[in-house]
Image: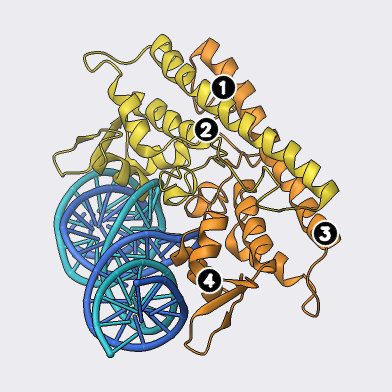
Chain colours: A orange, B yellow, C blue, D cyan
Amino acid sequence: METLTIGELSARSGVAPSALRFYEREGLIHASRTSGNQRRYDRAELRRVSFIKISQQVGVSLDEIREALASLPENRTPTKADWSRLSASWRYRLQERIAVLERLRDELSGCIGCGCLSLQRCKLANPGDRLAAGGTGPQRILNPAAD
Amino acid sequence: METLTIGELSARSGVAPSALRFYEREGLIHASRTSGNQRRYDRAELRRVSFIKISQQVGVSLDEIREALASLPENRTPTKADWSRLSASWRYRLQERIAVLERLRDELSGCIGCGCLSLQRCKLANPGDRLAAGGTGPQRILNPAAD
DNA sequence: CCTTGAGTTGAAGTGAACTTTAAGTAGCAG
DNA sequence: CTGCTACTTAAAGTTCACTTCAACTCAAGG
């Protein structure tokens, strides 16, 4: 079995077929076609899907994941070094997200003690210093540009 | 000035008037009305809005925030102790989210070294143990019930 | 009284990341 | 060749947390 059907890739990756088709429309993964127009995936696509899943856990949007994947060489199958480079590029993001949440936790602990929750006094309610919660949340919760 | 207009509450809380109206429709906050049908907010509502903002940063959905707010006493203005109790209830959530991300970071560091990203070998791509990324993301990325 | 800025409503739109549906075709075992 | 499952498409639907719009009314200063 040289290639995978969409059902097989789905089973092996844990990503629904509909999502795989969506990723293809969005230019994140690629598939060749049989004479009957069915998708056949190269085994290397499994790693791409894997990278997408991991990146989402890190909190990266599909847009950015596409960009990252676009930086892979097109003329050859990506090597471990290629994947390492991409993974490393997310490390900082992740570390920042963790730091934000830790700060929130510490401040919340303080506020649990005082019970203030006041917008005037409490730092928590005034995230002037980018207390982004992370994740692909809706609109400007995470990127409050409208301040 | 005993009460606040929606514009004033918006300015003081940093939450858009449209969002405040939305919160009211959703039963998260309350307002009395003037003879001309305009909203007037009790100062205590500021603390409710503050709690909503903080809760969102912790990664709690509006549904759950509504539930939490519903547990406040209706016959009196909530005390600091009331708010402390609610804040404390989010602490565990936040700590769990941080732990998940730290685990992800550590595993990602390992995978950066090996460059594997293999669904078979790499733990990262197989979040069997609830590697929820947190945040109010779309659908089941965070709550993969469809496994 | 008049103007102007702030407020009101319901309905529809947004964006991310998909899923669902409907109607049809491919591939393979028997 | 039959029958069955897995596949195909485009288009529309879903969820969350809002925002925007259109068409209006209210409140306050000059």
Q: Are marks 3 and 4 on the same chain?
A: yes
Q: Which residue is mark 4?
A: A5
* Label 2: element kind: helix
- Residue A108 - label: 1
Quarter that holds the N terminus of chain A? bottom right
Q: Are marks 4 and 2 on the same chain?
A: no
Tell whether label 4 touches label 3 (CB within 8 Å): no
Q: Nearer the viewer's eye, disc 3 or disc 2?
A: 3
Distance, label 1 to label 2, CA atoms, is 9 Å
Distance, label 3 to label 2, CA atoms, is 36 Å
Tell whether label 1 touches label 3 (CB within 8 Å): no
Residue at 60%, 52% in the rendered image: A56
Q: Is residue A38 above or below residue B137?
A: below
- Where, by quadrant of the figure, is residue B76 drawn? top left
Left of A52 or right of it: where is B76?
A: left
Q: Are marks 4 and 1 on the same chain?
A: yes
Distance, label 4 to label 2, CA atoms, is 40 Å
